[in-house]
Amino acid sequence: NAGVMQNPRHLVRRRGQEARLRCSPMKGHSHVYWYRQLPEEGLKFMVYLQKENIIDESGMPKERFSAEFPKEGPSILRIQQVVRGDSAAYFCASSAGRKNIQYFGAGTRLSVL
Amino acid sequence: AQTVTQSQPEMSVQEAETVTLSCTYDTSENNYYLFWYKQPPSRQMILVIRQEAYKQQNATENRFSVNFQKAAKSFSLKISDSQLGDTAMYFCAFMKQAGGGADGLTFGKGTHLIIQP
């Protein structure tokens, strides 16, 4: 009974590199959410996707960040040309439907050197 | 936009005691959900309890219960017979029930709860 799986757990990148974070939702879930947690802060909503569609990206930075949830495979959060301010924990959650309970993965901790 | 405020950055109690974590929120919505999530040192976010705003009865899950005061926009979490494994960050969160707008959860900044042996 696998929960939400995120990988890698830890990711180190140098400034200017690209970061790719992966999220496999719980079995039977087709809704995926991405959140960012800065040190000493709560989680901030970034984007909500269903299969092949971005439903709500109101929390996504306008530049360098993108997300996808293809028909096959995990959801990907992509950060291009990373900067030190991107260092944070990135959490993925999945749900069985819009407004249903969201179940979280263990997060990916991104460190930008 | 919704805001969630947790006014207690850190709390510490003895094992077996009862502790209450406070949460207030601000919204113009009438229908919404409120949640408490727990984040232990492993950093996994774990759902503790959920409350639907249209329900007057306070939600309960074993040792965890809430005091939901809709008019006051208050949603506190009570942990009875606290255990060492309850040590964690606790986040209060809000989500609109229906309609447009962000579908994501709005979180407070968290309360670090420490259970002392």
Image (cartoon, coloured by chain):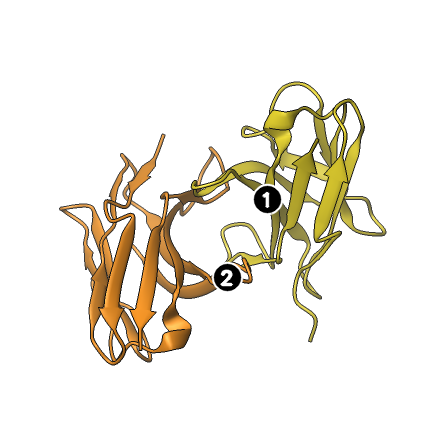
* Quarter the N terminus of chain A occupies: bottom right
Q: Position of residue B80 (x, y in %)?
A: 24, 76
- Chain with orange colouring: B
Q: Position of residue B59 (x, y in %)?
A: 29, 68
Q: Label 2 amino acid?
A: Pro
Res. B109 mark: none
Q: Nearer the viewer, residue B3 or A55?
A: B3
Read off the residue under disc 2.
B41
Q: Is residue B43 left or right of residue B108?
A: right
- Chain with yellow colouring: A
Q: Residue at x 83, y 48 (%)?
A: A71
As helix, strand or loop, the secondary structure at mark 1 comes to strand
Q: Label 1 amino acid?
A: Ala
* Quarter the C terminus of chain A occupies: top right
What is the quadrant of residue A56 in the picture? top right
The chain that hosts pointer 2 is B
Res. A89 mark: 1
**Position above or below: B44 against B106:** below
**Position above or below: A35 against A16:** below
Q: Is residue B54 visible?
A: no
